[in-house]
Amino acid sequence: MIQDLPINDRLVIPAAELQWRFSRSSGPGGQAVNTTDSRVELRFDLESSKALGPFRKARLREQLASRLEGNCLRVVAAEERSQWQNRQRAMARLADLLREGLKPPPPKRRPTRPGRAAVKRRLEAKGRRSELKRRRQGRPSLDD
């Protein structure tokens, strides 16, 4: 029943490193909500994981710092009425979080300046707008 968690083609988190906790859920289900433990909490301890190397651990610590509780990454699923569906959702969310956390950082932005033609177009547009507003100003004539 419990299965390993594939993150990408080179990384799989073994099922033994995942800690599950179940509790009663508030939400859809009617009277069954009061009797079944359908809420799922999935915890993954980054530091004690054997599947992650030191570089990956450091990157995940940095990227997911706001989501970590101690060294554990916690995901909760309680939307569905069945525990099995909530387990699937929790595993998918954890995999998505780890995938996002392991992505390489985006390339640095190289500062650029607008081209000469763009500057000229901007100044001409400003001049046209200024002229339009200047012409709108009603100057009282001597005949009034």
Image (cartoon, grey):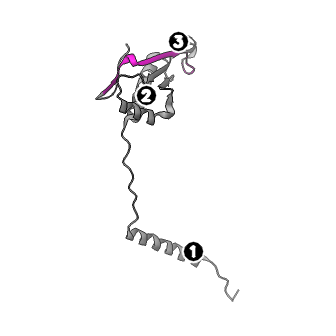
- Location of the N terminus by quadrant is top left
Please report contact status of discs 3 and 2: CB closer than 8 Å, yes or no: no
Mark number, residue 19: none
Question: Viewer-proximal residue, 144 or 138?
Answer: 138
Q: Disc 3 versus disc 2: distance between alpha carbons? A: 22 Å
For residue 5: magenta?
Answer: no
For residue 25: magenta?
Answer: yes
**Image-quadrant location for residue 118:** bottom left
Mark number, residue 133: 1
Which region is colored magenta?
11-28
Seen as rendered, the residue at the extreme top is 35
Element assignment for label 2: helix
Element assignment for label 1: helix
Mark number, residue 36: 3
Question: Viewer-proximal residue, 16 or 53?
Answer: 53
Rendered location of residue 56, percent (x, y): 37, 32
The residue that disc 2 covers is 93
